[in-house]
Image: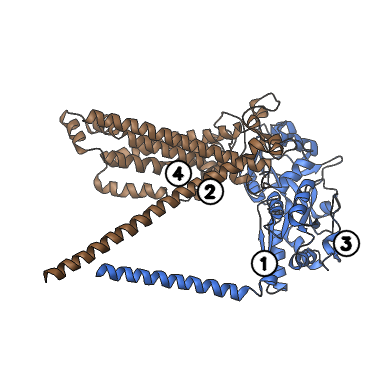
Amino acid sequence: MKRRHEEAFGRRERWRLRQNAAMTGLFSVAGWVAIVFIFLIFVFTFKETIPIFTDPEVKKEANIGKFFGEPADGPTLMDRYVWQPTSEVPKVSLWPIILGTLKATVVGLLFACPIGVAAALFSSEFAPPKLREVIKPVIELLAGIPSVVMGFFALIVLATWLQHTFGFTYRLNAINAGLALGFALVPIVYTISEDGLSAVPRSYREASYALGATRFQTAWTVVLPAAAPAVFASFVLAFGRAIGETMILLMAGGNAAITSFSLLDPLRTLSATIAAEMGEVVVGGAHYSALFFMGTLLFVITFISNTFGQWVINGMQRRMQGSAS
Amino acid sequence: MKLAARIVSTLTLIFALAACGGREATTSTDGTAPAAADRKPLTIKGSDTMVILGQRLAEEYMVKNPGMVVQVNGGGSGTGIAALINGTVDLAQSSRPMKDDEKQKAAQSRGSAVVEQAVALDGLAVFVNTANPVQHLSMAQVKDIFQGKVTNWKEVGGPDAVIVLYGRENSSGTYDYFREHVLEKGDFSPRVQTLQGTAAVINAVGHDKNGIGYGGIAYAKDVRPLAISASGAPVAPSEATVADGTYPLSRKLFFYFPQNAPERVTKFAQWSLTPEAQALVTKVGYFPLNTTGGATTSTAAATDTTGSAMAGAATTAK
């Protein structure tokens, strides 16, 4: 009786070990596949960029000097820094496009960050639990709206409304595009901030209340700083999404590559340029390589921002833990 | 015990799936292999201006030739030409003539010269909002407006308002045609907002009382096409003025395919010049090549020899 029991136990134990080994293997394969894919994408993007540095024919039309310097002649910035890769004399300054990307991103973040954090504070600190259970999924639902729908909304409804209300000369401008982008960023900022705020230990709040702080004072001066790493992480992720967002800006930004700092002018972003022009280019040509250079640039920008963000977050967390103990 | 059962059932499922997959794969190759040669779909890609035209022609052609499959895609003339060069489509539609270097590249990659065949005439219109009092512009004025030298409507007889420019993205044949014929190869103002497709341009101008845009006349809806004067009096775009050439902005719409293309391609191209097909051209809003009843034989309208190494080969494959 006892031996049979032990045998059964041994069998089960062997199964368990085998299952463990199999599943561990499966998961690590899945993990590696993801890493390999990202790596291959990067290698491919970068490989297509190389002719800019090596191929003499491509270099004549598109090179680093032309991307970032050597402006054309003209009285205004707009005439000197021009992106017109298919004209008789191709002009491939990236500045108007980088500027457009930054304008949209800044407006989008300025809109989304305060709203996202405020909404997160409200739902984690002030809202009754029942309301919170409604707010959270609804805002997160916003993240599920396809960006083409958001772009269409901005193109047809938002642009018309903004123009009528504020009398903008250009229907499609940085404000319109930035606001539409902001709608897409709010759920990112909200979700991650909210998780961070909710994770702040209850003892922090109790200590604050015990010292006579109001709910607002507690939320603003105790909970929010304690959740700072998460809030900052949400900004970094939102920035990454904003830089890479394509469809909304393609539809709502007006797509004019203008070197202008005005938020009332149309804009064109790196990702939108790639999307709009990639279909037309001859594989291996200067224009093609230039578009891949933009892709690499986007890759590098997000890589740097994520790394920098992680570094800042780590620093914050270390400080938090240091002061907590 | 339970676990063992689960594993067994999982494995069974996996095998079953694998078996299904395998069987499916084999039947499909077996089934289509003999027919594949002549049942391959004819793929067409290119000019957004010509998408509607291509689709109408394809529909009619598929009705006339049961079993034929014709797939028509847009993307812009440049996109279609790039696809022709890269070998991913059978036939490119283009609203601008192919450039010489493009022809060379295509000839290299496809192994034979490219056939250029005009299928229709199109009037390129300059549109303004219906609320805009401006009725006509000269070619020079249109050029100055789109180059950003004239920026206010009052300079061309309109109200005191900034001119808002709308155009096409640079893969568009319409963009190229406009740059070549109106801007005389100069550059567009960077202020031109580039939109995807003529329909989008029309929609934007329709919503913007200070807007101006350009596109195929067939798309004009809720906007006003301007009369254009080249040297003499302004001429409004219409079938008559485009056909007789008095309207200054008319152009040919082209089919491009390699000379050694399979029969399904050449037959379709040939058919597109029959009176029956040319009647469809008129229906879609473009103008037939030959106003006196369409091109009756394919040789008549075959190639517009704008230069370079192409034979009048639209007809070679019977």
Foreground tag (1 vs 4): 1
Gap between marks 2 and 4 measured at Cα:
13 Å
Image location (x, y in percent) of residue A88: 75, 37
Going by the numbered disc 3, the residue's amino acid type is Ala
Which label sits on residue A184?
4
Q: Who's the residue at 28% across and 47% down the image? A: A131
Residue indicated by mark 1: B41
Contact (CB < 8 A) between labels 1 and 4?
no
Which quadrant is home to the N terminus of chain B? bottom left
Q: Is residue A21 above or below residue A126?
A: below
Going by the numbered disc 4, the residue's amino acid type is Ala
Chain B display color: blue
Q: Chain of mark 2?
A: A
Disc 3 residue crowd, few under 14, some 14–19, many 20+, Cα 10 Å: few
Q: Secondary structure at mark 2?
A: helix
Chain A display color: brown
Residue A73: quarter of image: top right
Kindly tell me whether residue B36 is visible in this rendering.
yes
Gap between marks 1 and 2 measured at Cα:
33 Å
Gap between marks 2 and 3 measured at Cα:
46 Å
Q: Secondary structure at mark 4?
A: helix
Which label sits on residue B300?
3
Residue indicated by mark 2: A152
